[in-house]
Amino acid sequence: MEPGGCEAGPAVKAVAAVLPAGGSGERLGGATPKQFCTVQGRPLVSYTVRAMERVSWISDIIVVVSPENIETMKSIIEKYGHKKVTVAEGGITRHRSIFNGLKLFSENEFSNHLLQKPEVVIIHDAVRPFVEEDILLKVVMAAKEHGAAGAIRPLVSTVIASAADGCLDHSLERAKYRASEMPQAFLFDIIYQAYQQCTDYDLDYGTECLHLALKYCKTNAKLVEGTADLWKVTYKRDLYAAESIIKDSLSQQICIITDVKEAVVQVGFLLHECLRSQIKVEAVSVSLSKGNSHLQNIFSGQCYNFVCINDKKYATEEIQQLVNMLEESNIPLLHPVVLISAHLNSLENTSFSIDLEELTRMKKFAREVKRKNILVYGLLVQCKTEVSPRSLKSVHLERYPHGVTTTAEEEALQFLPYWSLTKQYCEETMRGGS
């Protein structure tokens, strides 16, 4: 829901995000700063930018990087098709980098043209890629009401202070304290005024933006309980953890592609309705021969699982077009892409609309693209010409099926493997799309 929605609280005129990404990655080790380390073939910072881009009510995204990495960041934006993104030159410290990012909304010398000054600005680390819209909305609405807000988490370890001789001086009662996390949000005028009043000591040694709002603008930030996935990639082991999370996330997303024919779109709608409570589902109705910008955005978002529903006699051509679009999008195919071609065949039709010659073509094509880490599967969908959405009870779709059966009260949609027409085809399909 957008901040201006009736259930989200008072309307927010404009929201922007500043992502500090100027760190050297010293604690990570290695020559590449952590924000530019690749995870599943994609730089970490790109995942964070994408998380912000998916939030429709964020109007501008400022990525602040060190001077030597400006061209690197620009190339990432171009390669992965990021929108609404402006690159800013960072300072020598975190606070100075954030301040430079904020100046793009207020000072001409830092930009060729001023961006629209937001009412609320989000500050979020570029190396925290798993931020969701829900927590962003919560901190934005809290900032609208209180002037500043930030995500917090319970302390994992007890905090202690050491004396000058290296011995324990005292410890803090863990239950009374919280770890400050990101994202944080501020009324723009408050955080900008705070940075304008900062001393050089604050800018060079400080790390907490909420403290600046309190110290210089007397603004007590609202603390919002965050989720466990707000952690920051700091050490090399964190990259491995991030990769594991991203892989799991990719397996829980699917895109259903149909052409514009009513019967095909209806089956796509039924499948979407049945799956959306189990996994993240997106449905697109397009003509693959003409291409589609929305579909390209899905590719750039690294969706790896597709169900392509059609009723055409030559289904292989449509799958080939989809594979061509995938390859042209230049997404890294380090994670297997799964394409399930579902062909509709009317129950009124006494013969199969796909002949053995077409099945042979599909089988050969599946074997060829498997070498590219693309797994092609086929389903033959036996259905009545018209199927009421209310008649379909459920679809039991296990991960990357070779065949699915769906049940209805009066009508039945039978999802059968393409290759089940002969024992040979079925056996070869069971070996992984070849």
Image: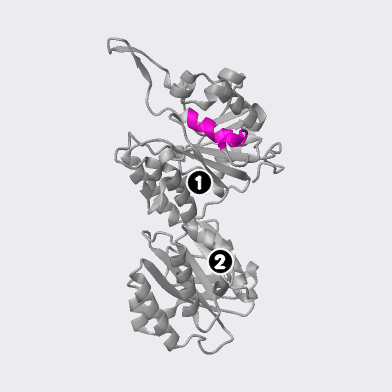
> Where in the figure is residue 17, as x and y percent of width and height?
56, 39
Q: Nearer the viewer, residue 325 or 231?
A: 325
| Magenta span contains residue 13 | no
- Left or right position of 244 against 19: left
Q: Residue furthest bottom?
A: 350
Q: How is the image coloured?
A: one colour
Quarter of the C terminus within the rendering:
bottom left
Q: Position of residue 99 (x, y in %)?
A: 53, 30
Q: Residue at x 62, y 45 (%)?
A: 59
Mark 2 residue crowding within 10 angstroms, few (<14) / some (14–19) / many (20+):
many
Q: What is the tally of numbered marks visible in this picture?
A: 2
Question: Residue 99 in magenta?
Answer: yes
Disc number placed over residue 271 in the picture, else none: 2
Q: Mark 1: which secondary structure?
A: helix
Q: Which residues are magenta?
A: 96-110
Is residue 433 visible in the rendered structure shown here? no
Q: Is residue 108 left or right of residue 231?
A: right
Q: Taking the image as drawn, is residue 78 in sight?
A: yes
Name the residue tied to disc 1.
Answer: 49
Q: Secondary structure at mark 2?
A: helix
Q: Earlier in the sequence, mark 1 or mark 2?
A: 1
Residue 227: where, in percent of width, then height? 49, 38
Tell me: residue 429, above or below residue 277: below
Front disc: 1 or 2: 1
